[in-house]
Amino acid sequence: MKSKVCISAEEYLGRVKKASNLISKAGLDVLIANSNEADFANVRYFSGFWPLFEVGGVAIAANGKAALMVGPESQEFAESWSPITNIHRMREYRESADPQFPGGGFNTFAQVFESIGVKNPKKIGIAGWLVTSVELYQSIQKAFPSAEIIKADNIVTELRQVKSEAEIACLKEAFRISEIAVDAVLSKIKPGMTELQVVGIAQEAIYANGGEYEAHALYLFGGNNTNNAISRPRYNIIEKGRIIQLNLGARYNGYSPSIGIPFCIGKMNPRQRELIQFGLDAHFKTREW
């Protein structure tokens, strides 16, 4: 099942241009936006590329030029996804298992910066500060010892907080799929199933209805575990009369809404009903907003 809703190549490249204006305004020569597989938003926002195992980065100059930086295994992968054609294979962006890659053929930060028209940067910003490894940071320092390196997540945040029509359409499509997954869980869950089995119902619905991935690690758990803010499903058995916490979502084209609801199988006591009603009211209030 394929939807026509998508982010165009023109929109991705337009984001690079908008970022370059903010980069110039901030007095930066270059912004490096880094992402990993779990926290992929920065790199995918500009390039459409979503790292797998490895790390990814986009270098954007104040002059509007950009380069996509990928790990040793991702060159062809990135070429098939990204409208940014200036792609560099770099050792610093390898996976955290730190495998050996004999034969070399890697580019350096100096080569990346030269490809976007920057030779002697004085000020470099990094977005994705918390996913930037020590080695990656030190490599930037070594390449440009006289440059000031600062945290610059705010530049990407400023861009991402305003959604285009295409982005809103992607969010709506992802939410549509997410609701189908919730309905599938509520219609098929039975006492005696494990939490993991129920999550499998949601995953089947997500992929069968056009989702590209789960929005996040899906979870469902009950009883005392509902005191957790977050958790993971286990082999615990679903029982009647216990409050169950469900949180799931479908990812579509990089956009990931999430639905969280409490519910109960069987008869609830008055206190449980009060809590469930509160959650239901909050759910519908969120939809109003």
Image (cartoon, rainbow, N blue to C red):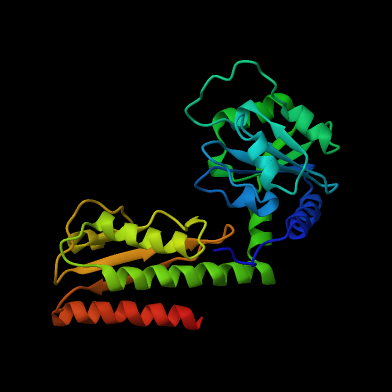
Looking at the image, which residue is at 72% across and 60% down? 8
Which sits in the foreground, 107 or 240?
240
Residue 163 showing in the rendered view: no
Left or right of 255: which side holds 63?
A: right
Query: As displayed, is residue 142 above or below residue 65?
Result: above
Which sits in the foreground, 272 or 153?
272
Q: Position of residue 273 (x, y in %)?
A: 21, 81
Left or right of 63: which side holds 187?
A: left
Left or right of 19: which side holds 242?
A: left
Which sits in the foreground, 141 or 196?
196
Residue 12 showing in the rendered view: yes
* Image quadrant assignment for residue 225: bottom left
Which sits in the foreground, 9 or 247?
9
Query: As displayed, is residue 21 above or below residue 275?
Result: above
Which residue lies most toward the top here? 103
Query: As displayed, is residue 50 above or below residue 197?
Result: above
Looking at the image, which residue is at 60% across and 16% down? 102
Query: As displayed, is residue 168 above or below residue 118?
Result: below
Which residue lies most toward the front here? 1
Q: Position of residue 84 (x, y in %)?
A: 75, 46
Q: Position of residue 202 (x, y in %)?
A: 37, 62
Looking at the image, which residue is at 40% across and 53% down? 217
